[in-house]
Amino acid sequence: MRSLPGLRTLLDLILPVECGGCAVPGTRWCARCAAELADDPVLLCPRMDPGVPVWALGHYSGPRRRAVIAAKERGRRDLAGPLGSAVAGALVRLHHWGELDASEQSSVVLVPAPTRARTARIRGGDPVTRIAVEAVGPRRVCPALTMRRGVHDSVGLSADQRRANLDGGIRLTGRGEHFSRCLLSESAELQSVSVVLLDDVSTTRATATESIRVLSESGIRVSAAVVIAGVG
């Protein structure tokens, strides 16, 4: 057991600890970046209207941009905690502002935006789902959506190309179908649930638009979408 601290020290020498938002050494997430992500969420102006408000923790720059890239491309699984805390804070504010349907904060259910299965495997899991679990706990996260085969990586695609790429490319998972049946059961407890779509970055809103369409057609009403960072 005494070898574990020594192992951590050795790993820190090989891979120095640095803040995922600003790269300051000596901490995985600094107080300055935490404070910036704790600011009020901002309402994005959609290029493509998903039919519900899309809120971002801020613009795709600074610590938000660096943290998203580190979590997605550099294997920084430890950033799910601070990013989840920031999302939780945003949900509290949106609830207080009356932007969510739920009568109580504890009635919010997060649906992670879908990702390609191959991409998730490469990343060792889905970062957005990890963030969602950290934000509200595993019992209030429903991975209801998945990408169909044939959907391509959207990097470099125009808004029209993203829309065409995702057209019919998102479907309900088994858990999504079960969630839909539960909501349609007219359970008094479930009638107060507020469903929020969660994603890391919003650019054209194509993913949010198609995701919300699929959820709505299955009887899952979405109150809002929340993203870590918004472009534009």
Image (cartoon, rainbow, N blue to C red):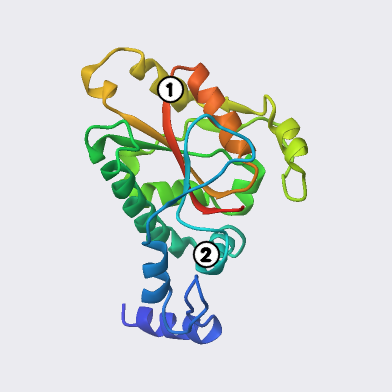
Please name the residue that numbered disc 1 is placed on: 220
Relative horizontal placement of residue 190, taking residue 7 as reference (left or right): left
Q: Residues within 10 Å of mark 1 (few under 14, many from 20)?
A: many
100 relative to 7 in the view: left or right: left
Q: Amino acid at mark 2?
A: Ala
What x and y, as percent, mark residue 88? 33, 51
Q: Characterize the local packing of mark 2: few (<14), some (14-19) or many (20 or more) Cα atoms within 10 angstroms.
A: many
Q: Is residue 30 visible to us here?
A: no
Cα gap from disc 2 to disc 1, whole angstroms: 30 Å
- Which residue occupies 42% across, 59% down? 83
* Relative to 186, residue 167 above or below: below
Image coordinates of residue 2 in percent, x first then y, are: 31, 82
Residue under numbered circle 2: 67
Residue under the image location 26 percent in, 44 percent down: 96
- The quarter of the picture where the N terminus appears is bottom left
The amino acid type, in three-letter code, at marker 1 is: Ile
